[in-house]
Amino acid sequence: MGLENLFLGFQIAFTPFNLFIAVLGITLGTVIGVLPGLGGANGVAILLPLTFTMPPTSAIILLTSIYWGALFGGAITSVLFNIPGEPWSVATTFDGYPLARQGQGGQALTAAFTSSFVGALFSIVLITFFAPLLAEIALKFGPPEFFAIQLLTFSSFVGLGGGNPLKSLVSILLGFILATVGLDIVTGQLRLTFGFTDLMKGFDFIVAVIGLFGIGEILLSVEEGLQFRGATTRMNLRVVLDTWKILPRYWRTFVRGSVIGFWMGFKPGGATPASFMSYAFAKRFSRHPERFGKGELEGIVAPETAAHAAGVAAMLPMITLGIPGSPTAAVMLGGLIIWGLQPGPMLFKENPDFVWGLIASMYTGNVIGVLMVLAFVPFFAAILKIPFAILTPLIVVVCAIGSYAVHNSMIDIWYMLVFGVIGYVFKKLDYPLAPLVLALVLGDLAENALRQSLIMSQGSLAIFVTRPIAGVITALAVFFFALPLLTPWWRRLRGVPSPPPVPRET
Amino acid sequence: MRLIARTAVFVALASWLLAAPTPAQAWEPTKPIEFVIPAGTGGGADQMARLIAGLAEKHKLTPRPFIVVNKSGGAGAEGFLHVKSKKGDAHTIIITLSNLFTTPLHTGVPFGWRDLTPIARMALDQFILWVNAETPYKTAREYLAAVKEKPTGMKMGGTGSAQEDQIITIQLEQALGLKFIYVPFKGGGEVCVNLVGKHVDSTVNNPIECVSHWKAGRVRPLAVFDGARIPDADWKEIPTVKEALGLDIQYNMLRGIFGAPDMPKDAVEWYVGFLKKVYDTPEFKEYLSRGALKPAFATGAEYVKWVEGAEQLHRELMAKGGLLKK
């Protein structure tokens, strides 16, 4: 890929109109990212009709800028209120919210935004120079490879929770059960709907998360009283610079998160599992795993880097193969057709100005994005100064609107409240929430991939080991599944005493 | 004062007299119109609905905007039931695909096109038999002979289960006495990419889902499941199934618009006029030709008759394929 193409792209991305469009898109996107439920896909879909009168390149810059904004914005409510604005920000709550409660919300947000930017940049550079090659690799991923990846995501979490394994198991099984409700794509039959038409669409992941984390936390706060320390933190940008001094320490996590995020982003729904996997590996390789879940900055760096790297990588299959890597990319793909472009492998040849304009705008969009959100860090952090009695009703209203917005349906608000109670009960009884969320988001994808693979192989499990890529990933997954059993044995072998039991994570 | 009052009365009378001979004001939307898509974002139905909503804005064809909402739950049943519950509503319409027929027949969820108000058929989508371009099969006959030689060995990828792709696959199987391994995926784009990646051996994708991979030389079209070849320049080389195999397997997918049950007549008329204007825009025409969709605008009795026939066809095909709800 010649640099002259990229240069051409920058000429398009740097026109005043396109820069204006990018700023506008990022502002809107950040707002969309902040509002839980109103995800990037909804936001892009709503604005799609407005783009018909624009040139295609400006149109895609507007839509992708909304997407970047949503990727940045998702972290804000995760950190401040324990409510993930977007599915990929769930793991950000684990350490972001404890930090905010310790009066370090500004630090947490700076880390989140900076990590997002680093992850994005990594993916953009890869797309710039290796897009066609990477597309060929993506083609090698069929259902068996996809299932192997899901397996790896689950395995990365095994043995990390500490606490009671039985409780983790209950949580994960509940997640799987909830994930099966609705239409089964393989047989085309409805499952676990008991004749209720409202259950047909299943449980949306984001509604569950708003309830479990957001409402659950609020119920807990009502009971215990909410305390945010450091309500007097000064409102200036010093915190950004101070945090930047600490962040290079986590360079390994940045690299790991970027790599995980990028190669998970190839496939639909990649950003969320990527953020979980990156978090799990950061904790696993950390010298202080016990600090995770209590306000460890690295616990923000890991998921945010991976999420944004995956979010950008989701654009790759869209521009090279014509398949969407994420729900948001799916809507953009529809836009391409409406603007008169044909998505797919010919896009690079037939519309180089569009493709390279888009790639160049990924650089400009993310630079503008990170500067904008960082500039507002003190403002976001100051939101926590609002008294709890005023803030809480507002949060509940925003949660309700968000839940409604997912499918424009009232029943989702009731689901949200029920999940809120479940979240509260789980926390009171010391059941971990993360396995449930992970199972809910991945259960559906993993089940489809597994069954598609088994249909392809006529029921033989060998398909997961005989195909080279699937084989390697499956082997890795098996290794991580076995790790909790191997570790004590390994330590004894080396004469290292076993560490004290690790406290439970969120 | 009196003069003003008199003038006002006079003006009012005059305007009444002038207005009286003209017919009553035609119906127009008085609030935003909810446009339901019983499928996910990014698919064929989604694209068409958003194009219609966008063209309405661009060409100022409606006094109120269209609000497009996806209700894809339960293979579209969520969207259909939502519209079914809006009896008499003049501001709710829905775009349909084949799941209008297949979902109630396969899942038993209670809805059907008779619950809705037919407005207009916009287009019909084609289906093509595709193989990977690196395979040696140059014709449908060669490929299907290979399938016959290798029973339970060849994989057919398709969108969903008990939906159009599987119906066509079963028709092929029954007509030729062979067997595919049918692998369901979530969307048509994903199906074609799995063909390019050689995870499946063939597909019956819509033209638009595979066209770019075809132009890139990665997949090969073998036959069109229709009575006539696609007239567009790029497509007319592809034989029909009848020409290629001597089989009469035809299948088109409806891209049509329905309104809420018992929608007022004058509202239906407005939507018909509106959709005709959309249909005549150059953008819509270009969209149809690029996706090799069959232009097929129809309304009123013609539309109803077509839908009746299509419903009957789906019932027969699904009964033959053992896909009806037991």
Image (cartoon, coloured by chain):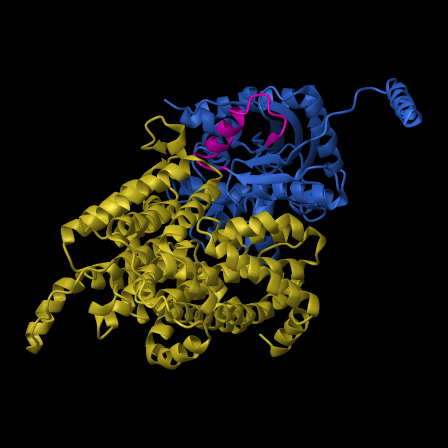
Indicate yes or no whether the magenta region holds residue B86: yes
What are the residue bounds of the magenta stretch?
B71-93
Left or right, A346 with respect to A454, comes to right
Q: Residue furthest front?
A: B1
Query: Which quarter of the image is occupied by the C terminus of chain B?
Result: top left
Q: Kindly identify the residue that appears in the image at 72 percent across and 47 percent down.
A: B233
Chain shown in blue: B
Looking at the picture, does residue A499 appear above or below residue A325?
Answer: below
**Residue B135 in sight in this render:** no
Left or right, A74 with respect to A291, comes to right
Q: Nearer the viewer, residue B40 or A349?
A: B40
Colour assignment, chain A:
yellow
In x, y percent, where is residue B225? 58, 36
Query: Quadrant of residue B218 in the image?
Result: bottom right
Query: Which quarter of the image is occupied by the N terminus of chain B?
Result: top right
Left or right, A265 with respect to B18, comes to left
In x, y percent, where is residue A441? 35, 50
Looking at the picture, does residue B119 appear above or below residue A203?
Answer: above
Q: Nearer the viewer, residue A360 or B220?
A: A360
Q: Nearer the viewer, residue B292 or B225?
A: B292
Indicate yes or no whether the magenta region holds residue B174: no
Left or right, B65 with respect to B149, comes to right
**Residue B279 in sight in this render:** yes
Looking at the picture, does residue B252 appear above or below residue A421?
Answer: above
Q: Kindly identify the residue that appears in the image at 36 percent across and 42 percent down.
A: A416
In x, y percent, where is residue B296? 69, 32
